[in-house]
Amino acid sequence: MIDRKRRSALVTALLGAILATCLAVTATSAVAAQRHAAAADCSAGYVGLTFDDGPNPGNTLNLLNALTSNGLRATMFNTGQNAQNNQSLVRAQRDAGMWIGNHSWSHPHLTQLGSSQITSELQRTQQIIQQVTGSAPRLFRPPYGETNGTVRSIEQQLGLTEVLWDVDSQDWNGAGTAQIVQAAGRLQNGQVILMHDQYATTLAAIPQIAANLSSRNLCAGMISPSTGRAVAPDGGGGPTTPPPGGSCTATITPGQQWGDRFNLSVTASGSSSWIVTVTLNQPQRVIATWNGSPSWDSSGRVMTMRPNGNGNTFGFTVLHGGNWTWPSVSCRTS
C-alpha cells in the first residue's frame, strides 16, 4: 500500500503534469488562432471582446481554449488579487495571445474611495501583472463601470486608458447563452462588449459568437490604448487607426542594489518614438537617471521619460525609503 506522503507527492506531480499539458495545448492553439485571424475576412471591421474578473482556476483555461480554437483573441481585465493568486493563468492568457488589462486590485466601488486608495488599487495591479508577464497593462476597466474625475486623473498618471463598453452581455445578471450570443450580435465596428471570465453560459457562447462575427465579416481585435476603441490586432485598420508612431512595450529589469537604493533599467520596444511613464511607490524618489530625458508631474512621483538619442533603454536610481516594490511602467508613442 502507498503511504500517505508518497500518495500526496504522486497527486501533486500528476496535477502539475496536467496543468503543464493544458498550458502547452493553449499556447499551440494560440498560434492556430492567430493564423486563423490573419486569414479571416475583416472587411466590416473589428470588435473588442473583453472578459472581466479573471483569472479563475475553474474556468480560465477552458475560456482560453474556447477562444483560441475559434480563432478569437480578447482583452482580459484581471483583478490584481486574482492575478497574484493565479500567476500561471496570467501567463497562459499572455501565451494564448490575449491582451491583459487592469481591473483594480480588489474590485471595489472606486468612486467611494479616496485618491490614495484608488491609486493603490490600480498601482498594485499594474505591478503584479508587470512582474508576471514582463509588461504593464495599458488599459483599465473600472469595476462596475463606475468612474469620475479623480479616477480618470489617476488612470492618466499611471499611463492607463479607461475602457468601458458599448454592449453589456448581462452574463453577470443571469443571462443565458442564447442571450449572450444575441448581445454580441449587436456589435459594430470599433465597439466593445462586456463579458466575464467565470460563467459557464459565457463559455458556451464563444463558438456561436465566433460564427456570428465571421458571418458579418467582423473580426475580434485589440483595444487601442490611444482611443479605447477596437482596432486590428496589429493596431491598424478601421476608423480608429492609432498614430503613425505605433505601439510600444516597456520592460523593466533590475540592476544593482544597496541598503537604501536600487537601480532599474527600462527597455522600450516596438517604436523609436516611445514615451515611458514611471510611477513610484511612496515614499520612493528617483535620485539619478541616464540614457533618457525625464520630466516630472507636480507630485514628483510620476516620471515621464523620452528618448535622448542614446537608444531605447534608460535607467534610474530609486531611493526606496523602506519600500522595495518596483515602480510601475507603461509605454505610449508620441
Image (cartoon, rainbow, N blue to C red):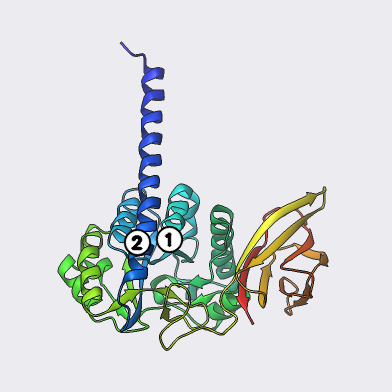
Q: Residue 35, located in which quarter of the rendered image?
A: bottom left
| Neighbourhood count class around disc 1 (C-alpha, 10 Å): few under 14, some 14–19, many 20 upward | many
In front of the other: 213 or 227: 213
Dot 1 falls on a residue whose secondary structure is loop
Q: Residue furthest bottom?
A: 239
Looking at this rendering, what residue extends furthest in the front direction?
Answer: 39
Q: Earlier in the sequence, mark 2 or mark 1?
A: 2
Residue tagged by mark 2? 33
**What residue is shown with label 1?**
97
Tell me what residue is drawn at x 36 percent, y 14 percent. 3
Question: What kind of residue is marked 1?
Answer: Gly
Residue 17 is at least partly visible in this image: yes
Q: Is residue 57 left or right of residue 302?
A: left
Instruction: Estimate the x, y position of residue 71 in percent, counting from the top left.
Output: 31, 64
Residue 128: which quarter of the image?
bottom right
* Residue 231 place in picture, x, y as percent: 42, 79
